[in-house]
Image: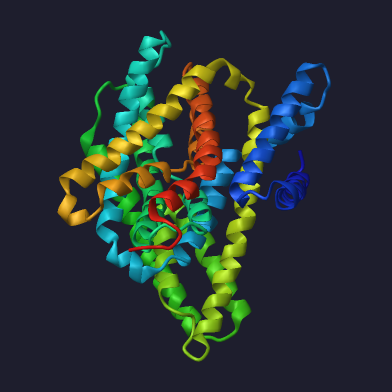
Amino acid sequence: MDLTLVITFLVITSALYSYLNARFLKLPGTIGIIVISVTVSVLALILNNLNVNIAKHLTILAKSIDFPGTVLNIMLGFLLFAGSFNINVKKLKEQIRPILVLSTIGVVLNTFLFGWLFYEAMQLLHIELPLIYSFLFGALISPTDPVSVAAIIKQSNMPERLETITTGESLFNDGLGIVLFITILEFVQSSSNKIDLGSSAVLFAREVLGGVTVGLILGVLANRLMHSITDFETIVLISLALVMGVVSIANALHLSIPLSVVSAGIVTGARSINIENKERSHQSLEIFWKLIDEMLNIMLFVMIGVEVVVSPFLNNYWLAGGIAIVLVLAARWLSITVPVTLFRRTLDIKYSNITVLTWAGVRGAISIALALSLPHSPYRELILAGSFFVVIFSVVVQGLTLNKLINRLFGSKPST
């Protein structure tokens, strides 16, 4: 299918779904779009099974879209930059310890706890799944979605400190989650039965440290360019060029795109654009990136709905998908509880906040993109189906109830 037609379809469908949600459902943007997308896709599958050739064009469209490449190499950069640019850097510095612990130790614990639990569950169901593939599933499902998290909690009464920790963790844990995924995938694809710790360490250093370094350098450069001029249109173009340049360089050098973009966004957003009119200029750029964020977010979940059409095997793994949902929540709770217990004085997170942090672990398109990027194997459909179940449940159920949980625990007024 022609690229112009694909983009046209996505834009028109996104506008239609957004209108239907704003006019009738009136749900938070992310949740409303995924509800409509999945509903339309399921109806298309049902009608197609009744010999009505409705899903045919959607199937052609879905196969025309390189979902993993589009999400991981294009859309993710813009979405993460928007989130990191708009974050309060002062508050981020104050909560940097719990953010770094949860986005590193927490992600690693989540990956291997979920992997082991899911492996044991599949053994009980007599479903063949090697432990290493279960760990691979854990790596791709562990990162939370910063876009969905920020969109959901921004209207809640979550205390500012806890909101900063939740948002900051979701921004940083994508990078480590993807690095873990790549590391485990390389082991799966290698002919050796041993994990090369040296190669893994080099990969980690290159992906993480290299990615952060590139992001910081280009972010500082772009920030200085923005400070040297007052023309707002040029400033916007510099910010767009920054994102695309960071993504291209990180991709070419095999560095972590999420960490590169987040680093660049934090550096760029930390200071106002110019001294003469800093408030209006900075706020205008924030509004621009919020608009980009919301538009791409809507298109992203429309694409997820389209992918459901070409995944009829989901019906074969509904039990495994249901188990994956429960185990993701259990692993998330444990991966927060363990660090909070071990580093209680350093992190200063109350045990009463663990429930909110667990339920705020919303998964999104990154997990599905990583699952779709898996090479063909006897276990790919099981992992892909589990990812779809977890993401849809996460966005819809956790998304719809998270604010209610927060308001129930913290009342009608924010507290610190």
Indicate the position of residue 216 as horizontal and vertical percent values. 37, 66
Residue plotted at (39% across, 55% down)? 410
**Number of disc labels:** 0
In the picture, the quarter occupied by the C terminus is: bottom left
Q: Tell me if residue 253 can be seen.
A: no
Q: Quick one: which residue is furthest to the top in this view?
A: 126
Q: Quadrant of residue 198?
A: top left
Indicate the position of residue 388 as horizontal and vertical percent values. 54, 31
Colour approach in the figure: rainbow
**Front position in the image: 382 or 264:** 382
Task: Decide: is 264 above or below 104.
Answer: below
Residue plotted at (24% across, 57% down)? 97
In the picture, the quarter occupied by the N terminus is: top right
Residue plotted at (78% across, 31% down)? 57
Q: Quick one: which residue is furthest to the right in this view?
A: 52
Q: Tell me if residue 124 can be seen.
A: yes
Indicate the position of residue 174 as horizontal and vertical percent values. 41, 47
- Position of 359 with respect to 17 (left or right) is left
Indicate the position of residue 229 as horizontal and vertical percent values. 53, 86
**Front position in the image: 402 or 364:** 402
